Amino acid sequence: MNPKERVEELRREIERHNHSYYVENSPTIGDREFDMLMKELEELERAHPELDDELSPTHRVGSDLTSGFEQVAHIYPMLSLGNTYSVDEVDGWVSRVKSSLPGEDVSIVGEMKFDGSGISLIYEHGRLVRAVTRGDGVQGDVVTANVKTIRSIPLQLHGEGWPDLFEIRGEIVMPWASFERLNAEREFNEEPLFANPRNAASGTLKLQNPAEVSRRGLDAYFYYLLGENLPCDTHYGNMMAAKSWGFKVSDAMRKMETIEEVDEYIKYWDTARRELPVATDGLVFKVNNLRQQLNLGFTAKSPRWAVAYKFAPERALTRLRFVSFDVGRMGIITPVANLEPVLLSGTIVKRASLHNEDIMRTLDIHEHDMLYVEKGGEIIPKITGVDVASREEGSKAVGFVSHCPACGTPLVRVEGEAAWVCPNKWGCRPQIVGRVEHFVGRRAMNIDGIGSEKADALVSIGIIESYGDLYNLTEDELMRIPRLADKGARRIIDGIRASLTVPYDRVVYALSIPGVGETTAKKIARATGDIDTLMAWSREELEAIEDVGPHIAEAIVDFFANETNRKNIEKLRAAGVQLSLPEVGSEGRSDVLGGKSFVISGVFSRHSRDEYKELIERNGGKNVSSISKKTDYVLAGENMGPAKLEKATKLGVPIIDEEEFLRMLNVEC
Ligand code: IVH
């Protein structure tokens, strides 16, 4: 392939990944592979300037700008660092630096590359006056109120010797311990989990609620001092001074003179970084002397006096103890590798999903095999391979089960799908418990006080047989759950009573009809209007509903043909659960939005996204999914996608936040 063709191919591929990442929120490639593609393209463009194109992805600068924050220009632009991926590449950089400074002694400072969100702090007369995110590198969001909640950041400097005005740059990070606590909470509340501490840190920094920021336990490390009259003419000296003023500067920072020391530093931290309390994605090497830094200068995007070394994605090798099979609420069987505990990217991994029979067979796992576990940007670790060389002689291949591990029923495989299913819907405990758990979940009936443990206890003790029985529970019955105090029982009863106001579409979602997620449930509720119509509709009638294909239509018909399901519906009806849409014109409806169209983007703090969608519709507005000239408003929460922001700004569509929106409805906020 000639360079022109390769350049074009790379540009197309990179833009495709950009789209998946920024627009669809579902990355299709790891950071490292993406960087490699960018690097290859940059190199080709450098070697063939005639192929340059102002629309090439290499001309894009990443941006984290968010609406709702004041934006200011950085005093010094916030540049990125050139990346390297091997000791040889770092050695090459050191040699180039040395040969650019002939006859001079050159010291190199090695430090951690913290994986969080870059921040610039401005101090005047020893007081923190402003904190700004990286933004697009030229201007960023002012997030001072949030940053002030981070306990490790000095608001008033200690010691002495600080210039009257200076800037210090660092990384806001979410330590592993805070990250795990936050995700555990979010899991309990059925909120989407953060994929990694970096996303959690930048998402938190953009909250409009400093009290919540404070609660989430952020931290910050500092690595770059800028300004006039700095205390020292070396980077290391300045960082030590910053440390004495109260900034957190990593103890891993080290001054080195030779390439051998640099190589040793890399070798050491390649593994030792796993013990650190925060996420790191590499190391940074910087020329220590500020005059030498000045001589080396900058390229358009990064300093020549510094380089990043990126760690290879973390992979661990550990022994398979056994493969177990989980039963989900829809009866789907998921194979899970149970492993000898192993430390991976800061957390101990004991279980990793093997997804389904096909994936398990492709990996060809044998008993007691040594397995490679990886944790990309995702939370759930995955098995990526088997170390066949270390396989025990005569060990047998691990097969898939033929019967349900919970109830012993023979499994069935749905034609055209990879999943095996246990058909014993009403006699298989994990399925019953799973459906109760789903029913009480925040996005369904939102019944407080029942988590997975209590749902399991209710079913195993035999107090309930399905979610329909929840409405006949008494406090005395609940007290039979071990370790449940009066207060806990009261809370559950109150939660059950409160669920009687949950709207019909969420009830449809709560029922656990196979294939019916939140969005489909809404469409079904709107199309049918009430449960009796839904139960009476034929396959053909159901298929006419948007998003309902033949599979789902069949699942709905089967669901309501089942006697236990019908009995459950009657129990819900007797209890007073909402089984129809509210009458039009009834309470809470208005026409104040008069047909205006809204695009919702980002994460909100006062109501959920769905609640906003509902508020829009209940008040005479329309929800649309993409921004066009015809869109009247963008309702933006935290972390609105940069592509949407750019489009709204370009088309002049007003961007409003939740407070403004609630004011439009005349709701107290
Ligand atoms: S120095 C002009 N040092 O990595 C050079 N950056 O890829 C300024 N980062 O935007 C950056 N740890 O957010 C530097 N020890 C470190 C770092 C570090 C993390 C981040 C920073 C920067 C990005 C560059």
Image (tube, rainbow, N blue to C red):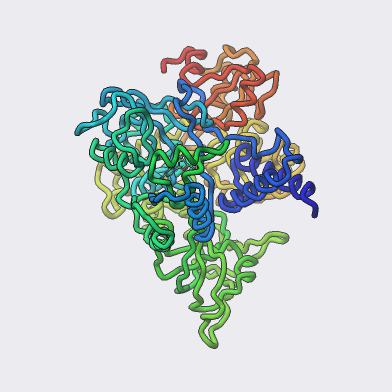
Image position of 614 (left or right of 343): right
Q: Position of residue 553 (x, y in %)?
A: 70, 45
Q: Position of residue 149 (x, y in %)?
A: 31, 31
Q: What residue is shown at x 41% (from left), y 55% (from top)?
A: 459
From this viewpoint, which residue is outermost toward the bottom? Answer: 394
Q: For ligand 1, which image quadrant applies?
A: top left
Residue 514's place in the image compared with 212, above or below, is: below
* Residue 662 vs residue 556, the one in the foreground: 662
Does any portion of residue 621 appear in the rendered image? yes
Q: In which quarter of the view is residue 60 placed?
A: top right
Does any portion of residue 609 appear in the rendered image? no
Q: Position of residue 107 (x, y in %)?
A: 38, 50
Image position of 202 (left or right of 412): left
* Residue 37 vs residue 427, the one in the foreground: 37
Q: What residue is shown at x 25% (from left), y 46% (from top)?
A: 485
Q: In which quarter of the view is residue 168 placed?
A: top left
